[in-house]
Amino acid sequence: MFNTSATDSVNTYDAILVGAGIMSSTLSVLLHELDPDLRLLIVERLSSAGLESSSANNNAGTGHAANCELNYTPVQDDGGISTTKAFEINKSFEQSLEFWASLAEEGKLMPKTFLNKLPHISLVFGDKDISLLEKRFAELSSHPAFSQMEYTMDHDELKDWIPLVMDGREKSEKIGATRIKRGTDIDFGSLTRSYINQIEGKESIEVDYSTNVENLQQDIEGNWYLSLEGEKNKKIVRSKFVFLGAGGGALSLLQKSGISEGLSYAGFPVSGKWLICEEEKSTKIHNAKVYGNAAVGAPPMSVPHLDTRWINGKRSLLFGPFAGFSSNFLKYGSKLDLFRSIKPTNFVSMLQAGIDNLDLGKYLLNQLTQTNKDRIETLKTFLPLVSASDWKLSIAGQRVQIIKKTASGGVLKMGTEVVTSSDGSLAVLLGASPGASTAVTIMIEVLNRCWHEKMKSSQWKKRMLELFPSLGIDINSNHEALLAIRKRNDFLLKLI
């Protein structure tokens, strides 16, 4: 495939990162902070950073901390509430805040360009869901991480929390809600570009835009060779380490790599749609992210929510998401992506996952047949007095859910997963939610897996502790440390 004998003409890097989204940009900044002399190459197929899944128009912009997302506290078979994932995600998001706070303290990041404080609210209707919300509130609020959570069924109090949602409702309607004021809205596209702008132009950093990775191959000495095609030229580059953080496109590149760890994976693409309102009469009144319950069979990314958003500094309201289907693995990808990903090694996994997720298939079919009138009717469950003319439809990003081979066939996984080669020379990020919010924790995992010897060095340990003062401390069990790091993060990020 490659002529690797003429190595003198091949540009060599310490790390090559594919994709200029939130994942690769986070890893590139971490690597640069740990060792500014590392030669890094970032390869992006689009004309700028953060235009695919990381773009503010392509995701919910929620700083996922399990404050309001009911799918992070699933109901168990015995009727109880599992909080394990909620505490895990809350801790991970706090680590993201900690990283941003450290960069802000050093003048390398401006929080106001991507981060806004915003209450996070869970909202449910009817006795059954209210009962579950009460259990969730009791479980979470007893812990310091969620001690600021409030609960109410009182219509007058709810009118203060979410006035736009309460307009036009009967006093007899049974509604329950929880609120945590310390929530956030994040423009991940702006954050991504801030990361890249921080390091672009450094002598050790190169960024190639409008460039595709056509293929990649490892030689017997452990070097990875990537074939790149830009608008005007083709070239081959080399590195001992490659990170594939290309969103939905990462699966295809993982398959091309030929590593055995990638043979068991397949993917199922799901696109999203939002209803967006920019009318000031509404955007000025609603000030929260309000999450409801997902429909039966719906993936986590389809939990309905009504959000205040700041996109490129402009305030708007967003409702959704509504699901769509396209065989693309990227919003700006190819219709052949799904079909090209089907291999003899993953076909059975895909078939089994399809059989086991018929509810998801029914859900998607229902979503695909919806009209705009149907979507407005769904919105009315949140906004009874909605004016349809104030809302327009917007196509969101493309997500590829993981299908992983198991002993019994295959399972559809809704989260994110890091796949690494046995020698640690290749790392791949697959999956979707909660993704961007926990990118820092995920990239630290990549460093620990693939750069473990460097991570043991005194230089890297020292810098990691400067960036993450709570590193090595379990803030879920050390309440004093939790309060201290939150106080620091809130002050430096101006979330007070």
Image: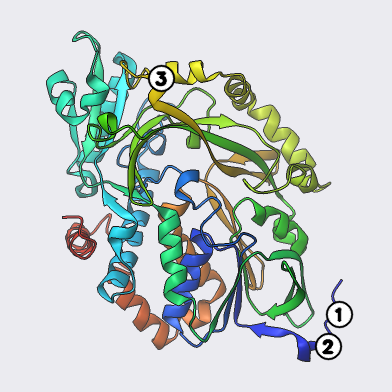
- Residue on which disc 3 sits: 388
The x, y position of residue 308, in whole percent, is 31, 38
Q: Residue at x 74, y 71 (%)?
A: 232
* Crowd rating for badge 1 (residues with CA inside 10 Å; few <14, some 14–19, many 20+): few
Q: Amino acid at mark 1?
A: Asn
Distance, label 1 to label 3, CA atoms, is 60 Å
Distance, label 2 to label 3, CA atoms, is 63 Å
Count of marks overlaid on the render: 3
Is the Cβ of the residue at disc 2 closer than 8 Å to that at disc 3?
A: no
Q: Amino acid at mark 3?
A: Ala
Element under label 3?
A: helix
Is the Cβ of the residue at disc 1 closer than 8 Å to that at disc 3?
A: no
* Crowd rating for badge 3 (residues with CA inside 10 Å; few <14, some 14–19, many 20+): some
The x, y position of residue 138, in whole percent, is 22, 33
Q: Please, is residue 257 above or below residue 33 in the view?
A: above
Distance, label 2 to label 1, CA atoms, is 7 Å
- Residue on which disc 2 sits: 6
Identify the mark nearer the N-term, 2 or 3. 2
The x, y position of residue 247, in whole percent, is 59, 53
The numbered dot on residue 3 is 1
